[in-house]
Amino acid sequence: MSISLRITLLMVLFLGFTRCDKTPVNPALEPYNETALDANGGTWKTYILSSGSELTVPAPELSSSDSYTAELADLKAKMAAATSEQKEAARFWGSNGVLRWHEIARELAAEYNAAPKVNPDGTYPVPDVNNPTNYPRFPFANPPYTSRALALLAIAQYDALVTAWNYKFQYTRLAPYKNDNSIQPLIPANDLPSYPSEDAVIAYASSEVLKFLFPGEKEFLTAQAEEHKESRLWAGANVQSDLDAGEALGKLVAERVIAYAKTDKMGQANNQAGVTQLRSDATARGITEQWTSRDIPSRPPMLPFFFNVKTWNFDQATMIADRPAPPPAIGSADFNKALDELRGFSKSRTREQQRIANYWADGTGTYTPPGHWDRKAAELIYEKQMNEIRSARVMALLNAAMEDAGVVCWDTKYYYLLPRPSEVDPSIETCTGIPNFPAYTSGHSTFSGAAAEVLSHLFPEKSTELQNMAKEASESRIYGCIHYRFDSEVGLTSGKKVGQYAVQRALTDGAE
């Protein structure tokens, strides 16, 4: 099955599980002419690698060599034999491979965003990474998991492309259609050196990382990487040695990123045995009224130790120093004011408030708030027709910040353990369900505050729109009666601060 058909089928399935106007569908992307080459991209600051020159890519054969001449002949034969479906695939992948692989990641997140159902004995099964296709499938792609998945994908793409750019402009091999005028590419031509192939780099850095994150999808992801790579031959954009070098490089970077992921403490994030100590510690700090699960029977809390996962733009000490101040005490005047507001929304919401609550719900069966913002970034990238390395930089800065925002938010949630509004007053009814973790601060608000801050820096002409989006996302949780107003307002401020750390990195990464 081709990737375009697979994504169409995923969207049909996805929309069947969600209400109208809840999560936007993927845009139609067409190949475009990349005019900015970013020739210095190989010097940009990397995340996992020490630099774009850490890994070695061997020099290609000269364009005057017999082996390159044979490669051109092979390329022309493959173009001549390409089927209509293969030509469609060439155009599909030629519309920015970075964005295509983020589409795949978002749809996988939506497909795997389903909490396990209760067992007959009242317990809940836990997804097993060693048996990912058994029920419940691994992973449960909840918001923290999805934020980390998108960050690892984006950083693998970015580090791999910085390395590719380093060698592209060191070796300066021209694209096939620059060496042979008889080759007419199916996608817009450009002056970017072709070795190693940026598309092969993206295909294998992306697919290998996603196979680690979604191990039940290995066959599908392998097939899509192969199609992406082969599409460059059908398009007339690369010869085979360009692709082979790109594949090898993409896999090497993916190995480094996966090694990092195995040590980032995500493996301990679901430590349910440690929850008793979290509660005891909170009690010792004077927090005696604590959040409990609203599921029947009670469900174990979602990733209670996600706050220990390694952050990208600051350390643990900084996170603790920046931790938001305590929420208003339960029963205080400020708390009761916030609770009264929710009682009002529970009884009566305007059509616009209901629309906003639904649009930003991003719950089960969706690609969660991080995916929502990832998709917005894809729109902005496509609108500006960025090349692959600059696209990858946007996605890396954004998604690293959103994972950091999730870590910060989960630290605050499990430090204060504030009950949800409907737990304090059962007469308050939510309109989009009750998440299975504490209230303060709002995850939507923290993710959105960070995302809007980063994207406003990268797309300053869109700043007002982006900040308004973050405010709307934050307020949606109040309209839905899922969060107190102070959850959302403090979360938005906290997320903005997280985003500022990413902006500090952007100012010094060599790309501005």
Image (cartoon, rainbow, N blue to C red):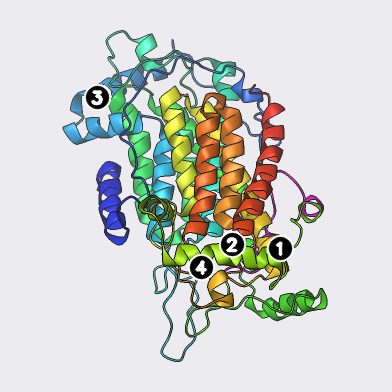
User: Residue 34, labelled with which disc?
Assistant: none
**Which of labels 4 and 3 is toward the front?**
4
Q: Bounds of the magenta span?
A: 302-318
Nearest to viewer (mark 2 / mark 4): 4
Q: Residue at x 65, y 41 (%)?
A: 499
The mark nearer the N terminus, 4 or 3, is 3
Circle 4 is placed at which residue position?
343
x 25%, y 27%: residue: 78
| Front residue of this view, candidates 85 and 474 | 474
Whichever of callouts 1 and 2 sits on the residue coming sooner in the sequence is 1
Residue 450 found in image quarter: top right
Q: CA distance from mark 2 to mark 3?
A: 59 Å
Residue 412 percent coordinates (x, y): 70, 61
Q: Where is residue 148 shown, x and y percent of the image?
A: 57, 53
Asked which secondary structure carries label 2, the reply is loop
Label 3 amino acid? Met
